[in-house]
Image (cartoon, rainbow, N blue to C red):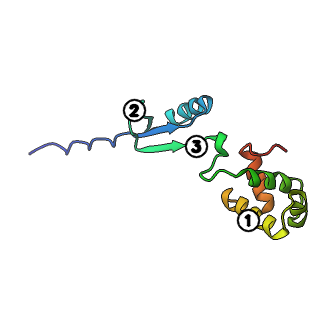
Amino acid sequence: MSGPDPAPDPAPDLAIRIQIAEPALTARLAALFGQVPGLRIAAPGEPGDLVLSVPDIADGGFEQPLTPRERDVIALLAEGLSNKEIGCRLGISPDTAKFHVGRVIDKLDATGRTDAVAHAARRGIIHL
């Protein structure tokens, strides 16, 4: 008669690779994740099972950077201007201003004008 079945091998730790340009944030996240059982920080050059990355804030923090005109528009949105007022300030029609506002909202993945301003402020595109 044989003894009890041996205990199964424990699951290997999940390796997390952190890809963030900000060294201080990388260090804080590494310290935080390093304390969680079953997780470990991937060694440099190791692919990792999970990749944590944050877009570079220098490009606005998103895939489609705002054009210079869209940056003008978000700054005017932050002032609370309407499409008509934005058009007057920029020398464009209200319809063109509306188009730019829509593009800004889409690019910032915002739900509306106020949310777009909040997203832009958080990403350092505008300063309130």
Q: Is residue 40 above or below residue 86?
A: above
Question: In the rendered view, does 113 fall on the left or right side of 23?
Answer: right
Mark 2, residue position: 45
Q: Nearest the camera: 42 or 76?
A: 76
Query: How far across and down, in percent of the image, does residue 29 sit?
Result: 57, 35
Q: Residues within 10 Å of mark 1 (few under 14, many from 20)?
A: some
Q: Quadrant of residue 116?
A: bottom right
Q: Amino acid at mark 2?
A: Gly
- Element at badge 2? loop
Distance between the Cα atoms at labels 2 and 3? 18 Å
Q: Earlier in the sequence, mark 2 or mark 1?
A: 2
Q: Residues within 10 Å of mark 2 (few under 14, many from 20)?
A: few
Q: Quadrant of residue 3?
A: top left
Q: Is residue 119 visible?
A: yes
Residue sticking out furthest to the front: 91
Question: In the rendered view, does 63 fall on the left or right side of 36?
Answer: right
Q: Is residue 56 above or below residue 79?
A: above
Distance between the Cα atoms at labels 3 and 1? 25 Å
- Name the disc covering residue 54, or none: 3
Mark 1, residue position: 102
